[in-house]
Image (cartoon, grey):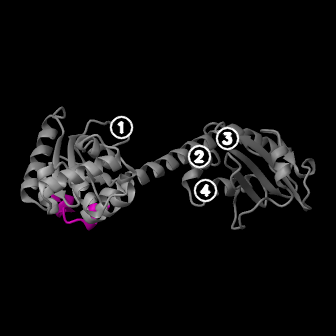
Amino acid sequence: MAAMRIPSPGDTDLLVPLHDGQFEQPMWRTFLVRLAREAGADHAVLILRPAEGRETVALWSGDKAQGVVPGIDDHALGAMREERVYALAELRSTQAATGDLRAMRVHETGGMDAWLVVVGEGLGAAVAALMAALAPHLRAALRGFAVLEREKMRSTLSADAIRRVNFGWISLDARCRILDCDPQAERVLQRSGLLRRGPYDRLTPASPAIDRELTDLVKRFAADPEERPRAISLSRDPWTDLLVAPHRIRAIAAGSQTVAMVYLSGDRRSTADRCEQLAELFNLSASEAKLAWAMAQGSTIAEAASECGLTVETARNYSKRIYAKTGARGQADLVRHILRSVLALA
């Protein structure tokens, strides 16, 4: 067998696919295929076990189904010392196995464990030296993978919370063309009649007056990024508002065309839906819930009474019962109780 090449810092055959492997599907396939070829092995396997004892995943160089490598059980994996390369005969396994293998454990500081294994016949000291040389690079790749996985989880949770409060964002260039948007805003563009993608991806409100106002704001932000943000009301039922702000966030890897951000906030539910939810949440009658929702939208007692078909005196009596049931000390407190309650997430 020819002398085995130990990877150097400039090595592109093994180290580049090792560091890029988390972006592949299946993950690390190129690295594992090349490692098996370099070692003269039948297979190369990367076993990943996340922190907190979650399920182990085995990634293979070939099309073999995922699973723990034959000949190594969980006890043997856990007993391995970090970065020491083991032969099959050194592993105290309860599983019978034929052939040979070399295995190495690497621990990532965030809690993830990984085992790099090559399986085949006639594996000697050169294979062990190759795997040992790969250990620090494997740890660095795992660290990046763990960080991305944690950020992916946080992003998923944040996106779910944002989706529940019907919040979204759209980035615009100086001509009001949509450069990017989050999934929530994309749903509004596809399903709502209030905003749409116009010709050349231009953000186009249904109202011509709002369209003119938005166009003017974006032009001003392009000329002066220190201009103050402006709120625009799109709809009262369901309630939908925009905050148009100059783009002041700069990132090295991001494009430089964005001049304005449109933050979209509103309610996915109709007034009737929200009144029904209010009634259940605070044990209000249907009439009390309807009045409470009108007051929470900023209407005065007289205005809310008119909206709900009540006399002002009846509305005042209802409002007292509403305050008692919700624990609010007045209309401003009622707004906070309703708009900051779990109702916003429903």
Instruction: Answer left or right for 213 relative to 290.
Output: left
Neighbourhood count class around disc 1 (C-alpha, 10 Å): few under 14, some 14–19, many 20 upward = few
Q: Earlier in the sequence, mark 2 or mark 4?
A: 2
Q: Is residue 171 magenta?
A: no
Q: Quadrant of residue 98?
A: bottom right
Q: Does dot 1 land on a helix, a strand or a loop?
A: loop
Within 10 Å of disc 4 (Cα), the crowding (few <14, some 14-19, many 20+) is: some
Q: Say which element carries label 2.
A: helix
- The quadrant of the rendering that contains the C terminus is bottom left
Residue 154 visible within the image: yes
Magenta-colored stretch includes residue 201: yes
Which residue type does callout 4 highlight? Met
Nearest the viewer among 73 and 25 is 73
Q: CA distance from mark 2 to mark 3?
A: 24 Å
What whole-number distance in Å separates the C-alpha atoms at marks 4 and 1? 28 Å
Question: Real-space Cα distance between discs 3 and 4?
Answer: 19 Å
Which tag, 2 or 1, sits closer to the chain's start? 2
- SS assignment at label 4: loop
x and y percentages locating residue 190 in the rendered image: 27, 66
Residue 328, image x and y in percent?
Answer: 31, 43
Q: Which residue is mark 2?
A: 16
Check residue 27 in the rendering and tell me which mark sits there, or answer none: 4
What type is the residue that disc 1 sits on?
A: Ala
Q: Earlier in the sequence, mark 3 or mark 4?
A: 4
Which span of residues is magenta-colored? 187-204
**79 or 242: which is nearer to us?**
242
Q: Disc 2 residue type?
A: Val
Q: Residues within 10 Å of mark 3 (few under 14, many from 20)?
A: few
Label 2 and label 4: CA atoms lie apart by 13 Å
Question: In the image, what residue occupies the spot 56% across and 49% down?
Answer: 20
Mark 3, residue position: 111
Residue 251 circle label: 1
